[in-house]
Amino acid sequence: MTLNDTISIAETVFAQEVDHEMVILDTESEQYFGLDETGAVIWQYLSENGALQQVFEIMFEKYEVDAKQLEADICRFTQELVDARLVQKQ
């Protein structure tokens, strides 16, 4: 997974914020996933725009973070979402 990748959220996946936490339901596997605050922010931006480079640019402008660490976190998290079949790489 790199910042050059674009993803789309699977049609069988629904996300909802519950008690300041993002909960994701995969209706196909019937599994629930809970995201921490950082994961929820990344999920929000991915759902608005699946281009990882744009997610990176938005987050880098909004948060005081190391660019290399942010890139690694976005790519790692997105790969975990792909592995869980919550999103697809395009």
Image (spheres, rainbow, N blue to C red):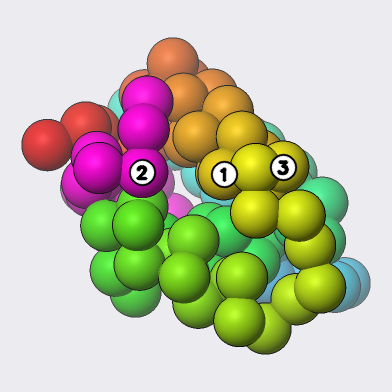
Which quadrant holds residue 21?
bottom right
Mark 3 Cα-neighbour bin, 10 Å: few <14, some 14–19, many ≥20 = few
Residue sitting nearer the eye, 90 or 62: 62
- Is residue 30 shown above or below 19? above
Residue 54 locus on image (x, y percent):
35, 67
Location of the C terminus by quadrant is: top left
Residue sitting nearer the eye, 68 or 52: 68
Q: Residue 69's mark?
A: 3
- Residue type (three-letter) at the residue carrying disc 1: Glu
Residue sitting nearer the eye, 28 or 82: 82
Q: Residue 7's mark?
A: none
- 9 to the left or right of 20: left
The boundaries of the magenta stretch are: 1-15
Q: CA distance from mark 3 to mark 2?
A: 13 Å
Residue 43 locus on image (x, y percent):
53, 58
Task: Note whether residue 47 is visible.
Answer: no
Residue 85 locus on image (x, y percent):
36, 24
Q: Answer with mark 3 or mark 2, whichever residue precedes in sequence.
A: 2
Q: CA distance from mark 2 to mark 1?
A: 7 Å
Q: Which residue is mark 1?
A: 71
Q: Which residue is mark 2?
A: 3
